[in-house]
Amino acid sequence: MGGRRFGGRRRAAVGVVCGVLVVAVCGALVVRAVTRAEWWQVRHSVTAVPVSPLADVGPPPGPLATSWQQSAPVHRGPLAGYNSVAFEVAYGQAVLASGGGLDVRDARTGAARWSYRRMGWTMLGWAATGTRLVGYFERDGDRGERMMVGFDALSGAELWRQSGETPASVARTTLRWPAGSDTVLTTDRDRRVLYGRSAANGTRLWTQRLPAGCRLFEGAAHASGSVEKTAVLALECGKGPSRLIAVRPDTGAVRWTRSLESAEAPEVTVLDGVTLADDGTALRAYRENGDRLAEWSGENVCDDAVCPAVVAGDRLVVAYRPDGARRGERRLEAVETSSGQAAWHRDAPEYAALAAAGGRIYALRPRLSSALLPAGVDVVDPGDGATQTVAAPFAMDPELDGARPWLAAAGGLLYAGVPTATPRPGGAARLVALRGGSAGPGPAELGGTPAADWPDACALLKRPDLLAARLDPGSARPESDRIGEQRLPHAVSCTYRAPEQEGLPEVPPLTVAPSGGPAEQPSGAPAEPSAPASPKRSGSASPSASASGGKSPGPGGAGGSPTPEPSDSGTGTGDDEWGARSLTVTVKWVAPTGQAASALMESLRAVQSQARRRTDIGGDEAYELGPTAGTIAVRVDRYIVVVTAARPLGAASRLARAVAVGLTGGAGGSPQPSSSS
């Protein structure tokens, strides 16, 4: 009897154990078959449509128009610092790469070709070489689970997959890692060994041990770069200065090594035959064999970013900040790669990016001028530095995170990558393909609009409007502007003060960037190229040419938050810090058509961290900009005007409404505002 009871308990125990094992096995199978299954994790599209390479030529100097554009949202993954969007144009394709994955489009039309994303994973690096693309992914919440995936760049077909190694060095600002000659460079956990892995099939091709005591920098902003035949990486070598090592991607053979003067991770840029490295003490250029080509001294020669640079023919052209120069002063210089002598140099605005194609250099300037809304493009002759400035059909704010401003030219198009604040809260980056636009009756600097069409900012409000806002019509302070050799005939900005505040000391208005901080005032008209000089120098440079006759408060070139003012105490006195209560009216732009003005207004809204649509202002569209009331941007047909008046409450809205009414009377042609005097 007792034996039967014992046997029953044993069978019950065995049954329980078996049940637990079945549940565990089923759970493991569910995890493998469902939780980590490819069928729901991966979103992968491919194409069989052929595409042909683009000619090495950009648009001719002249007005620019948007051919197509595409936004890529910023992927806010769990790993801080790797939330950028980057771009590349090659083989007739435009690549948009972010933490979310790869989006490849037809570079001529913007039509989708192929894409790859992994749910629950973040792409922390990508490489391009020949007709291959390789992505490096890590599982969210588990950095130990990593994967490299190789693709055919033209079709998107998956070629191979490998786990274990990591990219040799990933640039946080672009997510790029070095590759060339159909080989990607990887490393192990200790980062003391360099591997070459085939981009075609994923097999390891070679192994190169790094110099004793040195290891690859991890998580640096931009500590590596590559072209097809050369890859250059920065090494952290104990307490000593950092070093550069250049290798051949196909064999791993070391081309050269050089010691720098700082232990910090340098900013490295590799161009065709030239390597640039900024280690915080100087910007140095090296030839393909490692010989020193040129040096520009200064701790802030590139500020906190990479100095834009291109190789055009036999010349290296670099935009940098001369040693000892004031904030906002920049220089563009061409150095002969054969001799190292400067061919020419000139003062320049703060270029965000450079590109070279078809014997021309294209330079992206975040603001056409300090007062106007659009970005600008300078078309530079690499032979003598002669420059023509044209307006870009978009606004930008380089201070926004999510994308480093980028520029490329091919197939007769100019491609610009710029950050945007929308969609919120993460933001995005927008790739804009620009073509040559129709030549209008006006200059290219103004987008083809005749300068005579520009209204006088001091004539946009009537005398009763100003008196109702407790402002003195006689206190009008006009500000003029110019772009290159083109000077606008009327004031683009006008500031009024309260009558009881006349005679008080004036405080210069503060231009505020869309991100909320003070914006640098960019330089404008390029100076004539100077006589050749040696590129190595340590003294200060002459100030750069000013972009305009004055500064306007309120939004920066892309439109921004209003100038902060204290609350109105009702005493009628000014504030010692911010100056007197005042109003500023700025004609931000006059486009050739209402459609072009509407597109520019949309790009203004896109770069604002806070923009609220106002339907009570009038005109065609209006937005309240910034975190507090006081800045209104209004569009009436071709005209975009910004009104800034923080006090009294509601003054900006009332005065913007008056501006809209005045402009509406002249919409379709030149406005006919009444004089305020």
Image (tube, rainbow, N blue to C red):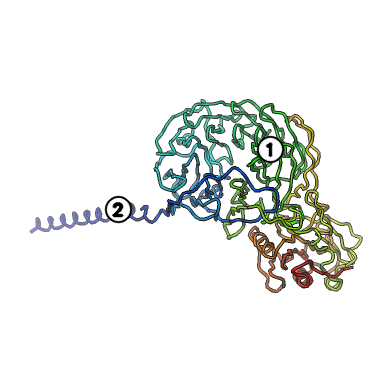
Along the viewing direction, whichever of 66 and 254 lies nearer the viewer: 66
Left or right relative to 303: residue 177: left
Q: Secondary structure at mark 2?
A: helix
Residue 649 falls in image quadrant: bottom right
Point out the tag, 2 or 1, that comes first from the N-terminus.
2
- Disc 2 designates what residue? 29
Along the viewing direction, whichever of 638 and 461 lies nearer the viewer: 638
Say if 155 sits above or below 165 in the image.
below
Residue 318 is tagged as 1
Residue 335 falls in image quadrant: top right
Say if 111 sits above or below 323 in the image.
below
Along the viewing direction, whichever of 262 and 654 lies nearer the viewer: 654
The N terminus, quarter of image:
bottom left
Q: Marks 2/1: CA distance? A: 57 Å
Question: Given the image, on which type of amino acid does mark 1 rest?
Answer: Val
Front disc: 2 or 1: 1
Q: Residue at x 30, y 55 (%)?
A: 27
